[in-house]
Image (cartoon, coloured by chain):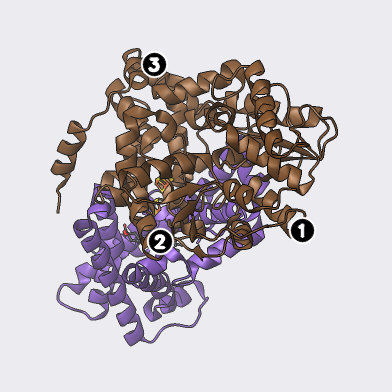
Amino acid sequence: MHEIYQLASGILVWVALIVFVGGTAGRLIRMAITARKKDAVIYQYFSFYYALRSILHWIIPFGSMSMRARPAMTLVAFIFHICLIITPIFLAAHVILIAESWGIGWAYLPNAVADIMTILVILGCLFFLLRRIVQRDVRYLSTPGDFVLLLVVAAPFVTGIWTYHQWSGFEIAGIVHMLSGELMLICLPFTRLFHMALFPFTRGYAGSEAGGVRRARDW
Amino acid sequence: MKTSEDFQAAAEEKRIYDAGIEEGAKKLTPEKIRSVFNELMQTEGGARLEAYTKACVHCGLCSDACHHYLSNDRDPRFSPAGKVKQTIIEIVSRKGKVDADFMKRACEIAFTECNLCRRCMIYCPFGIDVAYLMLFVRRACHQLGVVPQYIQDTAHSHAATYNQMWVRDDEWIDTLQWQEDEARDEIPDLRIPIEKEGADIFYSVIGPEPKFRAQLIYQMAVIMHAAGVDWTMPASQGWDNSDMCMYTGDSEMTARLKKIHFEAALRLKTKRIVMGECGHAFRSVYDVGNRLLGWKMPPLQMIHAISFYSEIIEQGRLKIAEKFDRPVTFHDPCNIVRGRGLHETARYVINQVCTTFIELEPNREHNYCCGAGGGVINCGPPFKNKRVQSNRVKADQLAAAKKKGAEVVIAPCHNCHGGLEDIIRHYELGLELKFLGDILYECIQKE
Ligand code: HEM
Ligand code: SF4
Ligand code: SF4
């Protein structure tokens, strides 16, 4: 038990961070090189202005027709994504741990707010899960991996709030929390979660072609 | 609600026989598929393919963008990402180890269940270009020799004659002179200048114009004459700006076609190209062919007929004698709206020439595809019923405009015309269909 705790809170944190950063950078660099060889158009037509124009329309809630057409999905997706990214970075417990080990720190969220945001992430996962089961086209598109991934994403949040509130079995939950958090980081560059890193590029390229060549809006 | 089994059964029932697909598939072996596909992946399967297949979060936000999906009772297999799942994802993940039956189905999906209209691209948060992926599948089909027969025939015509309709060189010149003759009954000093070196404008059309719709050349000649334009058309190959090879995945042939088209305009030392009212031809010259030939932008200015009309109206060279007074609506063609942003230009022309304009909903970049583009109508009679059924949503959209009073639909694109004509007839919409040039011809001051 203690050994696993040591492992999860020590070396595995580093492994996860290195795999996450290295894997993401490595894959992006490899794709950039492939694009040079086989997709010359991307570099030729890429326009920062139009890329940014498109990206902005798609990261502002309800900025696109597609989002306006599905208000519930848009609302949940935005809340989910914001909470998913913000909570772990600005969680008091994480900030303090990092300050203690590395001597750097930053502002953190009040615990009650972090609790709510964690619950929102979990509810978001449930919403996505429900959607994958209920909505026929999404069900058809879903692969087994999609469900596993939802579990991987939900796990650190469920176990995190569990540990924080010291509900029964929280010692084990704490270990699962660390392990699943690390697993999620490790999965990021190699699974569909990689959409995070690809978004600025695919959207930016679409925006460049739409704006610079096709002179049309793509939102 | 229908279950997937119902859809499966319905699909089996509807299996369409196409000689090009069936006979082509008979010659396939698993080894051949694998080696052709792996070679294609090596040479052309790059970062876009990887990003589009990997970024997709299977969220289904693209589904409602596709008229095939909406019109087929939301059968998920018609959703854009669903078509990707059934074709390229499967081939890539199996590293090309698929059989002939799989390729037949992939071919039918890529050629007849996607119009490459790119509407889904502006509904996907990631801007995933499903049309690019379907074209990738078509490219594989082309290299494997499994292509629907009718569109392959037009591709053969392109290869043999440099035009889409097996029009011979003498027939082409004959047609121009015939139309000139006819028009001179109406306007005695009208000319269709052939091979005029140094003319301001090189006018090019698609193969079906001389073949089936020669009156469009007549009308354009009248418009050119009325506006006092210095124009010409070539006497030899390069007059046809259309391009079905772009849609069969035959990139090599597309490059040759676009090259001879540009070269004809350059040979005649014309200042710029005006293209007739066609969308796919415009895409092939403006967006595809130039890239295949290594030009970032076309080597000389080229504009679509809509821009040309707008220009001569704005400059006061074309006078409207009497406005068209029946209520019109406008179908935004994918290839010149999502493909070139000409929606406002078209509306300017319409408002100059027509008294009453009623918008389709949705419109502009968000208009639904006609269901014919992307080479789908060119796959011919075997797929006609399927095509018309797969665009019920277009019929509903048109019917709504009719309810608001529209009597005439303007579609400045040949493919859209073909598609809408079938839809209007099949769904008994009782709407009249026109090119913008038809209306201009009717309304302008001719002398
Ligand atoms: C910055 C980091 C990001 C992370 C960590 C992240 C993570 C996630 C996770 C965990 C899910 C749900 C899991 C699933 O359904 O399998 C998800 C879903 C989704 N993400 Fe992201 N994402 C990020 C950025 C983005 C961006 C920039 C976009 C683009 C607008 C985006 C669009 C979506 C969409 C549309 C879904 C819904 C998928 C569904 O129905 O399940 N994400 N994301
Ligand atoms: S037909 Fe248009 S909307 Fe449908 S999948 Fe093809 S490109 Fe997308
Ligand atoms: S909207 Fe984009 S990410 Fe979502 S399923 Fe469609 S193609 Fe994939």
The answer to the question of whether label 3 and label 2 lie on touching residues, with beta carbons closer than 8 A, is no
The alpha-carbon separation of the residues under discs 3 and 2 comes to 50 Å
For residue A33, what is the image quadrant? Answer: top right
For residue A135, what is the image quadrant? Answer: bottom left
Please identify, in this view, whether the residue under mark 3 or under mark 2 is nearer the observer. Answer: 2
Residue ID for mark 3? B32
Please identify, in this view, whether the residue under mark 2 or under mark 1 is nearer the observer. Answer: 1
Residue A70 place in picture, x, y as percent:
34, 67
Foreground residue, A77 or B411?
Answer: B411
For residue B279, what is the image quadrant? Answer: top right
The answer to the question of whether label 2 and label 1 lie on touching residues, with beta carbons closer than 8 A, is no
Q: What residue do we see at 47% from left, 60% from top?
A: B363
Residue ID for mark 2? B401
Residue A174 sits above or below residue B216 on the image: below
Image quadrant in which the N terminus of chain B is located: bottom left
Q: Give the letter of the chain under mark 2.
A: B
Residue B192 place in picture, x, y as percent:
74, 32
Which circle's residue, 3 or 2, is located before the other in the chain? Answer: 3
Is residue B58 shown to the viewer in this render? no
Residue B301 place in picture, x, y as percent:
75, 43
Residue kind at label 1, given as amino acid type: Gly
Residue A184 sits above or below residue B220 on the image: below
The alpha-carbon separation of the residues under discs 2 and 1 comes to 31 Å
Residue B157 place in picture, x, y as percent:
54, 19
Chain B painted colour: brown
The lab-note entry on whether marks 3 and 1 share a chain reads yes
Residue kind at label 2, given as amino acid type: Ala
Q: Which chain is purple?
A: A
**Mark 2 residue element:** helix
The mark found on residue B278 in the picture is: none
The alpha-carbon separation of the residues under discs 3 and 1 comes to 61 Å
Which circle's residue, 2 or 1, is located before the other in the chain? Answer: 1
